[in-house]
Image (cartoon, grey):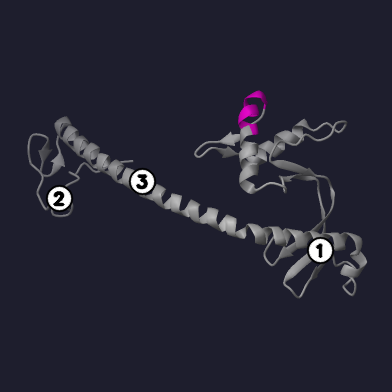
Amino acid sequence: MTAPTEHPDTAQDGADPDTGELPDDGPGWVDGRIANLRGMEEAGRKVVEAEAQIALNEAAAEAELETLARKVRLVRERQEKADGPFRARAERYRGFMLGFMDQNRAEVLRGLPAKTKSRTLVCGLTVAYRKHEGGYRWDQSKTPAENKAALLAWALKHEGEMESPNLTEPGPIQVRLDAVKARLDALYDPEQPRFTPPGLEYVPPGESLTVTTKGEK
């Protein structure tokens, strides 16, 4: 890629866009352009100085963003605490619904076309019977944060021992879930129970009973 050799301070009329000053037409410059290595050094110093200021701005921005992030975390923690009793109530009654579905499939689907496997209730929930393949999913008895922390700890401990792609990725470090699942599938021995690492659970092939709100999967 060919870069112009015109002095970076010579925008349009040759003046510095910030100060309005014209560049020195000294030994390193001729007609506002770099003439030799001395001019290159001068231009390089200006680049270093400008990028140092950019780094200061970035540090200031990161400090401010961290303050905002702490505020967001506190709000989420308060929300989680406020949601607690309602989440427990929702799960309790969802359990009652799943129990009824398990014992009364014919009644749940009564009046619907023969191949229909779900029913939308007036309350806005949809109950469904879904066939699924076997596979790993997050442990439903734990919170997402607990699952991710547990699986990350396991992956960090074992990825160096396994002949497989890295189980984690940097920046910020996190689990490569597809790589973990692929490795678990590769280790599977039909003669042995499936191994399940912390944070995950294995669901065998079969039919799932679900109670979902509109838009949920």
Of callouts 1 and 3, the N-terminal one: 3
Quadrant containing the N terminus is top left
- Choose mark 3 or mark 2, whichever is in front: 3
Can residue 208 be spotted in the picture? yes
Please report contact status of discs 3 and 2: CB closer than 8 Å, yes or no: no
Q: Position of residue 134 (x, y in %)?
A: 80, 45
Q: Which labelled disc corresponds to residue 97?
A: 1
Amino acid type for the residue under numbered disc 3: Ala
Q: Which labelled disc corresponds to residue 63?
A: 3
The alpha-carbon separation of the residues under discs 1 and 2 comes to 72 Å
Quadrant containing the C terminus is bottom right
Q: Position of residue 27 (x, y in %)?
A: 8, 34
What residue span does the magenta drawing correspond to? 154-163
Residue on which the image places disc 2: 16
Of the pair 128 and 83, the residue shown nearer to us: 83
Q: Position of residue 93 (x, y in %)?
A: 77, 63
